[in-house]
Image (cartoon, grey):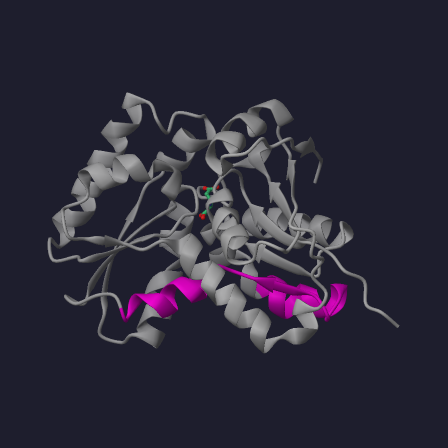
Amino acid sequence: MQASLGPIGVFDSGFGGLTILKELRRALPDADYLYLGDNARAPYGTRSFRLVYEFTLQAVQKLFEQGCHLVILACNTASAKALRSIQQRDLPLIDPTRRVLGVIRPTVEAVGSRTHSGAVGLFATPGTVASGSYEIEIDKHSPGTRVYTHACPMWVPLVENLEADDPGADYFVKKDIDALFGKNPDIDTLILGCTHYPILLPKIRQYVPAGVEILSQGEIVAASLLDYLERHPEINERISRGGTATYLTTETADKFNHLASAFMGTAVEADTIRL
Ligand code: DGL
């Protein structure tokens, strides 16, 4: 019997996963994608483990219901707080043939080859920083690399409230960059460990010291997905190939469409759903 086909599900608490979706579409343009932003409940970064897990599981189940066989948690907070439980505890019960992947592991795998000073900086949500996930994973893959972390609780609200381009954002971006590089000026590689942060990239570039490499998590995750699909033909052959992207949000569609269209560079018309 022919297995059913479905889009690749891409999930984030809000707009941030668009920075991953954009690169996935560039790397694998013929696949269909179904994006889900839980904008009504963003930010996740200041929420408890239990809530991030519950919200993420609801989103994954919704994407499965919509026909996705593969879901990417395009959200570091959900990857840090919910991915392992979903993979190990929930998936075997829901449907062991489906897959859920995160963004932290591929990012960490790329870090070791990039830094020369051995000092790496991480900006992320309070939840991701508190989880210690990046330090634990970097220690496994590149022992000896020193990781300096700084939580930026204001950056996601700036993006979710469509303030990323406004002058008010400069204050918080500069303040947080100064705080991180104040911990060690030798940091030569910077991880934006929250998928919302690339939406602030023009401002981040303005204040980060010259010569620091800012890793592009979208590109890294896209390359890692291509590699994964090559190694897992049973998942690859269940992806529908119409080259489309469809969008779901838990907020009003108008608000979502505005920033999503600007960021994706094409008209986005989302449907509002409840989780
Ligand atoms: N974009 C998400 C991340 O990568 C979550 C941000 C948030 O909702 O706080 O961490």
Question: How many numbered tags mark residues here?
Answer: 0
From where the camera sits, is residue 49 visible?
no
Residue at image position (75%, 66%) is 95
Question: Is-magenta flag for residue 124?
Answer: no
Q: Nearer the viewer, residue 77 or 261?
A: 261
Give the quarter of the figure containing the N terminus: bottom right
Give the quarter of the figure containing the C terminus: top right
Question: Is-magenta flag for residue 89?
Answer: yes
Residue at image position (28%, 22%) is 167
Note whether 94 is above or below 20 in the view shown.
below
Q: Position of residue 231 (x, y in %)?
A: 57, 77
Note whether 27 is above or below 18 in the view shown.
below
From where the camera sits, is residue 162 visible?
yes
Q: Position of residue 34 (x, y in %)?
A: 65, 47
What segment is highlighted magenta in the picture?
85-113
User: Based on the displayed image, in which of its 4 quarters is residue 156 positioned?
Assistant: top left
Left or right position of 7 against 222: right
Q: Nearer the viewer, residue 194 or 234?
A: 234
- Majority SS type along the magenta span: helix
Left or right position of 239 against 256: right
Q: Position of residue 229 (x, y in %)?
A: 59, 70
User: Based on the displayed image, in which of its 4 quarters is residue 251 positioned?
Assistant: top right
Q: Position of residue 22 (x, y in %)?
A: 50, 47
Residue at image position (36%, 62%) is 134
